[in-house]
Amino acid sequence: MSQPDESHSQFSLLKTKRFAPFFWTQFFGAFNDNVFKNSMMALLTFGVLHSSLQLAEMNNLGAMLFILPFFLFSALAGQLADKYEKSLLIRYIKLLEIVIMVLGALCFIYLQTWGLMLLLFLMGTQSTFFGPVKYSIIPQHLKPGELVGGNALVETGTFVAILLGTIAANIVSDMESGPQVVGTAVVVVSIFGFLTCLKIPEGKAPSPNLKIRFNPFTETWHTIQFSRANNAVFLGIMGISWFWFLGAAYLTQIYEYTKVELGGAPSVVMTLLSAFSIGIAAGSLLCERLSGHKVELGLVPLGSIGLTLFGIDLFFHANPSNSPELIEVGQFLSQPMNYRVLVDFLMIGVSGGLYIVPLYAMVQERSDEEHRSRIIAAVNIMNALFMVISAGTGILLLGVMDLDIPEFFLVLAIMNAVVAWFIYTVIPEFAMRFLIWIITHTMYRVTHTDLNKIPEEGPCVLVCNHVSYMDALIIAGACRRPVRFVMFKPIYDLPVLNFIFRTGKTIPIHSKSADPQTYENAFKRISEELQNGEVVCIFPEGKLTQTGEIDEFKNGIEKIIQKDPVPVVPMALKGLWGSFFSHKDSKALTGLPRRFWSKVELVASDAIPPQDVSASLLQKKVAMLRGDRQ
C-alpha cells in the first residue's frame, strides 16, 4: 500500500486545523476586497456615487491607489513577517481589515466617494502586509508532499472568491438600498475572516533578531536584490509576475472586448470572467494530480504553451454577432461559434493555474526559511510593477499604436512565448522536467509505493534494477527530491536524452578498462554530490538487462559507501520489460513502439545502514521488491 502522504487528496487539507482556518481567512479576505472594489465601481458607473472625474479616470485612480502600497510597504511587510510570529501578525492584519470595512460601511451609507477612494489605499496596505505572511506560513504548516496541494487550494479559493465577490457586487449594487447592503456585508465578512484567523496555528518567527528598516525606497531595492541571490528563485518570481502581467491585460480589456468584438452585454462579460476564474481554479487543482504531490516544474512549460496557443486563438476568433444591440448571455450561448471564445478563456485560466502554482511552490520550497517572507515581499513588489507595466503596455499598443483588442491579445501571446523561451533557456531545468513529464505521462502510467522511504534531506544512494532507457526518467519524475543519476556513458550520450541527463547533473560512467578517466571522474563526482547532501541513484547491474532478469550487482556500490557512508535505499521497477525502450525480442529503440500508457510501478523499501551494505544484499532486496513482474 502507498503511504498516506503519497495518496491523500488535497481536499483533505480543508479538514485539518493547520490549513483550514488559514484557507478560509484568505478566502473571506479576497471575497471582501472584491465586493468592496466592484461595488464601489458599479455604484460610480450607475451614478449612485458621484465624482468630478470621469469614470475611466476614477477606475485608473482606484487601481493606482490599491497598487501603490505594494511599492511602499512590501519590503517592511516582508521584514515583519520574518521577525514576528505569523499567526499573531495575521490577527492584527485582520483587525485592521475590520476597522477599514467599518469606515467603508459609513462611506457607502453616506455616499462619500473620496472616503472610499482613500480606503482603497488602506485596503491595498492591508493586502500588502498579508501577502508575505500568507505565502510564508504555508510551508511552515504543510509537509513537502502537501505544498503543491496547499498552494493549489489557496489559488483556487482566491479566484473563486474573486469571482463570487464580483458577482455579489453586481447583484447588490443593483438594489435600491445597495450602498447600505454593501456596507453591512463587508463588515460582516471581515468579522468572519477575523474569527477564522483566531484558529490559525502558530507560525514561528524565523528571524526574531532581524533589525527592521523603514526606508521604503532603500528597502524595496534591497528586497529585490535579496531575491536575486538564488537565480532559479528569482526567475520563478519573474515568471509569477509575468502571469500577473498577462492576467491584468486580459481582465482589463475583457469588458471592451466583449462589447466591441462579441457584441455582448455585461452578462456576457460575467460569463467570460466566470470561465477564466473557473479555469484558474481547475488548473490549480489539476497541478496536484498531475504532479504526484511534488513540486513539478514540468507543468510550467505546459501552462505557458496553453497561454500562448489559446491567446492566439482569441485573435482568430471571428465576430459572430451582427446585431446593433448588445446580446445577453442566453443569446450569446445560443450561437455555437461563441463557445470557441468561451473555451479559450476557460483554457487560458487552466493554463494559468498549471503555470503559477508550481512556481509559487518552488519559490516557497527553495527559499531559505529565515528569508522566505522577504522573498515573498519581492514577489508582491514585482507583481505590482508588472501590473503597472501591463497597463502601460495596453495604453501603448491600443492607444498609441492603435491595435484592436484581438491584435493586442495576439501580441500578448507572442510575448508570452518569447518570455517562456528566455526563462527555459536560462534555467533549462524547466524544459528538462517538462520533457520528463511528457515522456513519462504519455508512454506510461506510473504508480509508486513507499517513496517516502527516501530521506527528505541529507545524502543517500538509491539502487534500482535496470530494464530500459527510460528508467532514470521514470525515477526522476516520481521522486520529490532531485536525483543525481550515475549513467552508462553510451546511454548518457543518446540524443534528446542527453539534454535531460546533462541538465539533471547526471554522472556518466564507463568501465575502468574501456575509459579509465570517465570511470575515475564518476566516482569523484559521486563523492562530491553525497558530501553536498544530494541523492545519488545507481544501477548496479551496469547495463540494461538482456533477459528481463536482474543481472549481478557490481561492487561499485561498496566502493561508494566505503568512501562516503550514507544510507542506501533499494528500489525496483516493474512493468518496463517489453517496452520500446527495453531489449526484449530485439535491440531497444528498433521498430515502432507497440505499447502506450503501459502500467509501470516503482517500489522502494527501508533504507539500509551503510555498515550493512553489500552488492549481494542489495541484489536480493531489489529482487524481492520486484517480484515476478518484469
Image (spheres, grey):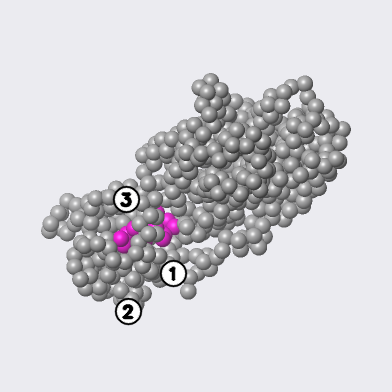
Q: Does dot 2 land on a helix, a strand or a loop? A: loop
- Label 1 or label 3, whichever comes before in sequence order: 1
| Quadrant of residue 548 within the rendered picture | bottom left
Where residue 417 appears, x then y in whole percent? 42, 38
Which span is picked out in magenta?
A: 470-483
Residue type at mark 1 is Thr
Residue occupying the point 63% across, 27% down = 215
| 511 to the left or right of 41 | left
Q: In the image, what residue type sits under mark 3?
A: Ile
- Residue at the disc numbered 2: 628
Q: Quadrant of the C terminus?
A: bottom left
Residue 308, disc: none
1 or 2: tag closer to the N-terminus = 1
Residue 74, given in percent of the width and then of the height, sits at 62, 34
Q: Between residues 40 and 256, which one lies in front from this camera angle?
A: 256
Magenta residue check for 416: no
Horizontal side of 569 relative to 128 (left or right) equals left
Tag 1 secondary structure: strand
Q: Position of residue 207 (x, y in %)?
A: 59, 43
Front residue of this view, candidates 488 and 53 = 53
- The secondary element bearing badge 3 is classed as helix
Q: Which residue is mark 1?
A: 449
Q: Pick out the residue farthest to the front.
A: 323
Residue 21 seen in the figure: yes
Q: Amino acid at mark 2?
A: Asp
Which residue lies under the disc numbered 3? 500
Asked if marks 1 and 3 touch (Cβ < 8 Å), the reply is no
Q: Residues within 10 Å of mark 3 (few under 14, many from 20)?
A: many
